[in-house]
């Protein structure tokens, strides 16, 4: 059966959303329907994915205000396990953009772990987001499988949905950056099959730089939690340092065991023109 998407605003739909949140995340993560109903009436945006009458995925977002600008905070997106890795999340994000533009929004923000490169590729390459802010231990300690044992450091991603850069991605013009030949701000070494950070470079000043991270961070965590912590510490030092110097994360280049972020020293307006 074809998967369909639609906005959620009625009480019955938002009660289904409660049930789905519990199934996808946990009972403790559920936002009560009295809250989602209120948010839906006052600038929030809730989307559902349906297989027939069954809600199988959701995206929930609410109004925020930073940088003297109203924007949409995209907080949760999830699908039941059997519907994942089918491109449904990308479709839902483009629907979110369309609906947000209708409501007058021009920017959507969300957080993600900079060491999770699958998310990075979606956010930067496919959707055209940019990053110039790093939040240490954004959510405090979390006990779920993905986050257990490490500080929850996050990128704050900006999705400028009316920009030329995002319009190009929407038209299918994904950019595949090449990190080859770019000065790296971090060197790595592979020991016993595990890639680990070595020396940090805080003195680079070229217009384009690369910052390598593990391509499969969860595998690093399973192999050696000490190495995983070293990656968190290295990136926590490097990203804020180069953001303070005017660099913006504009893309990511994936290799076998590494993925390299591309940092560019350009004005945000220039980056967003595409």
Image (cartoon, rainbow, N blue to C red):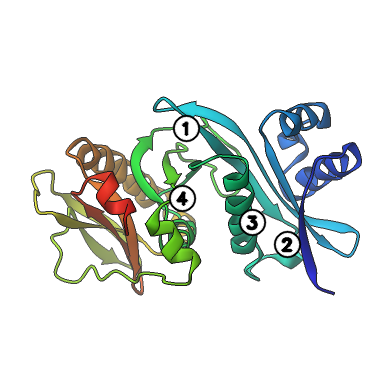
Q: Where does the image place residue 200, in percent across and percent down from the top left?
A: 17, 48
Gap between marks 3 and 4 measured at Cα: 14 Å
- Give the mark nearer the N terminus: 2 vs 1: 2
Gap between marks 2 and 4 measured at Cα: 32 Å
Along the viewing direction, whichever of 176 and 239 lies nearer the viewer: 176
Mark 3 Cα within 10 Å, few/some/many (few <14, many 20+)?
Answer: some
Residue that badge 3 annotates: 95
On the rendered image, what quadrant is the N terminus found in? bottom right
Q: Is residue 85 above or below residue 7?
A: below
Q: Is residue 201 above or below residue 140?
A: below
- Give the mark nearer the N terminus: 4 vs 1: 1
Foreground mark, 4 or 1, reads 4
- Residue 162, which numbered label? 4
Is residue 79 among the parts visible in the rendering?
yes
Q: What residue lies at 56% left-to-right and 37% top-to-bottom?
A: 73
Q: Is residue 111 above or below residue 167?
A: above
- Residue 138, which numbered label? 1
Along the viewing direction, whichever of 125 and 199 lies nearer the viewer: 125
State the image quarter where residue 233 is shown. top left
- Give the mark nearer the N terminus: 2 vs 3: 2
Gap between marks 2 and 1 measured at Cα: 26 Å
Looking at the rendered structure, the secondary structure element under dot 2 is helix
Q: Where does the image place residue 115, in percent across and percent down from the top left?
A: 41, 52
Q: What residue lies at 36% left-to-right and 69% top-to-bottom?
A: 175
Mark 1 Cα within 10 Å, few/some/many (few <14, many 20+)?
Answer: some
* Count of number-bearing discs: 4
Left or right relative to 173: residue 132: left
On the rendered image, what quadrant is the C terminus found in? bottom left
Gap between marks 1 and 3 measured at Cα: 27 Å
Residue that badge 2 annotates: 81
Foreground mark, 2 or 3, reads 3
């Amino acid at each position: 059966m074809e998967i369909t998407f639609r906005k959620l605003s009625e009480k019955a739909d938002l009660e289904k959303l409660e049930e789905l949140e519990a199934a996808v995340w946990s009972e403790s993560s559920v936002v009560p329907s009295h809250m989602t109903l209120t948010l839906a009436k006052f600038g929030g945006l809730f989307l559902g994915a349906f297989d027939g009458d069954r809600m199988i995925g959701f995206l929930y977002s609410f109004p925020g205000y930073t940088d003297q600008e109203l924007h949409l905070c995209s907080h949760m997106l999830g699908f039941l396990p059997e519907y994942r890795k089918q491109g449904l999340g990308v479709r839902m994000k483009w629907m979110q953009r369309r609906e947000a533009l209708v409501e007058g929004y021009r920017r959507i923000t969300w957080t993600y772990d900079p060491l999770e490169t699958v998310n990075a590729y979606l956010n930067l390459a496919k959707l055209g987001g940019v990053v110039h802010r790093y939040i240490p231990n954004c959510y405090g300690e979390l006990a779920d499988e993905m986050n257990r044992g490490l500080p929850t450091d996050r990128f704050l991603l900006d999705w400028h949905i009316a920009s030329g850069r995002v319009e190009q991605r929407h038209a299918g013009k994904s950019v595949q950056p090449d990190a080859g030949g770019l000065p790296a701000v971090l060197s790595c070494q592979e020991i016993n099959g595990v890639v680990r950070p070595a020396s940090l470079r805080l003195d680079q000043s070229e217009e384009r730089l690369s910052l390598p991270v593990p391509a499969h961070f969860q595998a690093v965590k399973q192999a050696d939690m000490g190495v995983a912590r070293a990656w968190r510490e290295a990136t926590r030092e490097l990203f804020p340092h180069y953001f303070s110097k005017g660099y913006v994360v504009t893309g990511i280049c994936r290799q076998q065991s590494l993925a390299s972020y591309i940092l560019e020293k350009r004005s945000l307006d220039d980056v967003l023109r595409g």
